[in-house]
Image: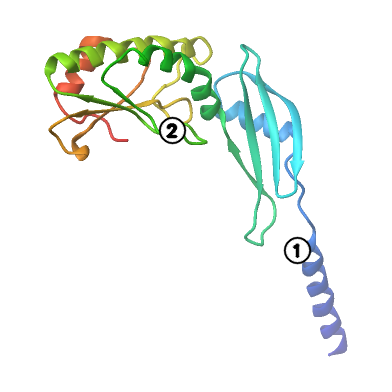
Amino acid sequence: MKKHFALILALLLTVVSLCSCKIGPPSERVVESIVEKSIPEQAHCESVRNEKEHVYYTFRSDLRDLTFEVIAFQNQTGFGGYWERIDYSKAVREHYKNDLYAELKSCPYFRGRKEDAEGNYPFEFNYRSDEDARKIAGVIAKLNKIVSDQFKYTPDADLTSSKIMCFRMEILKIDQSKDDAVIYILNGTDGEDVIYQKIVQGKQEAS
């Protein structure tokens, strides 16, 4: 009986010992492997910054002047370890944002955009007539031309994907409810005619 009790006690101590071991953050090599599988643009880890519960891995594109972070969050559920978030799309949106605003500043139908840390609020447009809608379509086509630059670095990527870019346009006719707004996502390819048809035909894409 004593031997049986001693064996159980030893097993319990082993389990407690294993559970109490702190699992360290993922290595730079591991994170680079995760990024390589998740992001179509070639990049390498430039630096690592450990801040208690979060570890920040700064990546630089091998193809252009673009940096983004991968953040490893310490698991707080009691199981230990870390989970990673790749902020590539945030960096891409920031990369093109100023050029988009430069084009939008002369558009009388552009109403602005809420700004947040993630940069994923829609650009808002209001219009009254089909003629106005046509002009908005022309401006958005120019925005598509700007972001088409992304294809140089991710040739086969879907620019409407939240993993890549996902710049959203919210286009609302003055006499309609906000629920009727058309959501158009820049894809880097559509021209004015295609965008105009999507505006006048009503809501085409979910936000």
Which dot marks residue 196?
Answer: none
* Residue shown at the point (75%, 28%) measured from the top left: 47
Residue 204, percent from left and from top: 22, 29
Question: Which residue type does callout 1 highlight?
Answer: Cys
Q: In the image, is 163 to the left or to the right of 132?
A: right
Q: Secondary structure at mark 2?
A: loop
Quadrant location of residue 124? top left
Q: Relative to 181, say whether 65 is above or below.
A: above
* Residue shown at the point (80%, 59%) measured from the top left: 21
Residue 151, percent from left and from top: 47, 12
Give the Cα distance between marks 2 and 1.
39 Å
Q: Nearer the viewer, residue 196 or 75?
A: 196
Q: How is the image coloured?
A: rainbow
Which dot marks residue 19?
Answer: 1
Disc with the residue nearer the chain's start (2 vs 1): 1
Q: Nearer the viewer, residue 142 or 204?
A: 142
Question: Which residue type does callout 2 highlight?
Answer: Asn
Judging by the rendered image, the residue that carries numbered circle 2 is: 120
Q: Are marks 2 and 1 in contact (CB under 8 Å)?
A: no
Q: Secondary structure at mark 1?
A: helix
How many residues crowd mark 1 within 10 Å: few (<14), some (14–19), many (20+)? few
How many residues crowd mark 2 within 10 Å: few (<14), some (14–19), many (20+)? some
Q: Can residue 84 be seen at all in this image of the molecule?
A: yes
Q: Relative to 39, say whether 152 is above or below.
A: above
Residue 133, percent from left and from top: 18, 18
The N terminus sits in image quarter: bottom right
